[in-house]
Amino acid sequence: MTDATSAARVPRRLMLARAAVVAVFFVSGAGLGVWAAHMPLLKGGLSLSDGDLGGVLLGMGLGAVGAMPLTGLLLHRFGAVRVTVTAALAFCLALALPPHASDGRALMVCALLLGALMGGLDVAMNAQAAAIEKAYGRPIMSSVHAFFSIGGLCGAAASGALIALDAGAALGMGLCAAALGLIAALAALRLALPGDAHAGADEGHGLRLPSRAVLGLGALALLAFLSEGAMIDWSAVFMTQATGASPALAAVGYAAFSAAMTLARLTGDRVTARLGPLRTVQLSGLIGALGLAVVILAPIPEVALLGFVVTGLGYANVVPVLFSASTRTPGLAPGTALAMVATMAYGGGLMGPPLIGFIGEGFGLRAAFLPLALAALVVAAGVSRALPRG
């Protein structure tokens, strides 16, 4: 069956629902890009030290992780559509608040709120994307996740343009928040599936202890997020300290990783449909380990850049497949299982950067990146036991 024939058989309402959830992923990623791009202005405006800023960022991460289990309960009670729409609109409103913080503590409260809303939105929009994927009858999760990355690039670029025009943080973040809020509001009109008034509200109680299946998926997602978090904070530092790259070239390290991941996710649905979830994650883990091995052994910056590209290609489809699989966990509501897996995954994202720092201080950054390569191999080896059957 050709793609054109397949597309022709997809109901228009279903295609609109997919476009709407893509828009929500874009809004989430763009909001994060806006926040990150304005960080220097926020830091300078409040005269925060590096330690103060670290506390603010930690608050954002803790807010996200803390909100995810609660989101599972909300999904069980209200359904994925309502929770996604509410969280997306609230996230856009909260995005305009940080420039109005009067001191570091107020900014930490803003970051905690942003993190909580972002974490809740992440679980809810993934739950709705999984429901749409189920209605499609074929993989769509990887391409949907690609638009989170695209949104991040667009949010950062738009913010950079506003900053270059000497727009202050209040005006810049306010304009971006308004634009993203409009996109979220338009997406809300088409997000529901046909007959989908209460998506995600399955039988059983929303508050459950994780099953062995959920723990297995969550552990693999944790390892994937651990590496992604390390790439965000340590790729540029690795380039400068381990390979002697200039600061300008070092900045390309994470960009290369992120661009490769985005491109791989745009084609990831076809890969998953062709190979199946199991082989996709196995191959992804092996490619990720290979890329990290290249990074660790790189004698010059250009080879390290190649390694970051390969690593991005490898890790691209691991999390989308695992998140999608979590919604098929036997005995648990899709939103509840996804919330559990996502909470573990984001915990890994928080653990990764400090873990690299602790190991790097004692043994050097090349040695610090070695556990990331081992984690990729564990993902490849362990996925066969973690994925739900069928």
Image: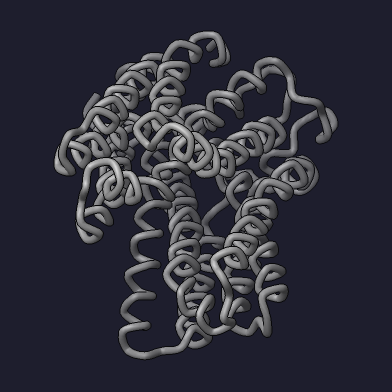
Check the picture and name the quadrant holding the N terminus: top left
**355 versus 247 height, above or below:** above
Q: Is residue 176 left or right of residue 193?
A: left
Residue nearest the observer in this picture, 90 or 56: 56
Horizontally, residue 104 falls left or right of residue 236, namely right
Q: Is residue 160 left or right of residue 349?
A: left
**Image location (x, y in percent) of residue 263:** 26, 42
Percent x, y for residue 16? 44, 52
Decide if residue 101 is in sight here: yes
Q: Residue 350 placed where, x, y %? A: 58, 44
Q: Nearer the viewer, residue 36 or 81?
A: 36
Q: Residue at x 28, y 41 (%)?
A: 242
Up-down: is 23 above or below 295? below
Residue beneath the point at 61% across and 27% down:
218
The quadrant in which residue 287 appears is top left
Q: How is the image coloured?
A: one colour
The vertical placement of 45 against 354, above or below, is below
Where residue 377 sits: x, y (%)? Answer: 41, 17
* Residue 117 in view (yes/no): no
Identity of the residue drawn at 42% across and 44% down: 145
Total label count?
Answer: 0
Instruction: Residue 112: name its quadrant.
Output: bottom right
Residue that lies at the very extreme toward the front in this rendered image: 362
Q: Nearer the viewer, residue 295 or 67?
A: 295
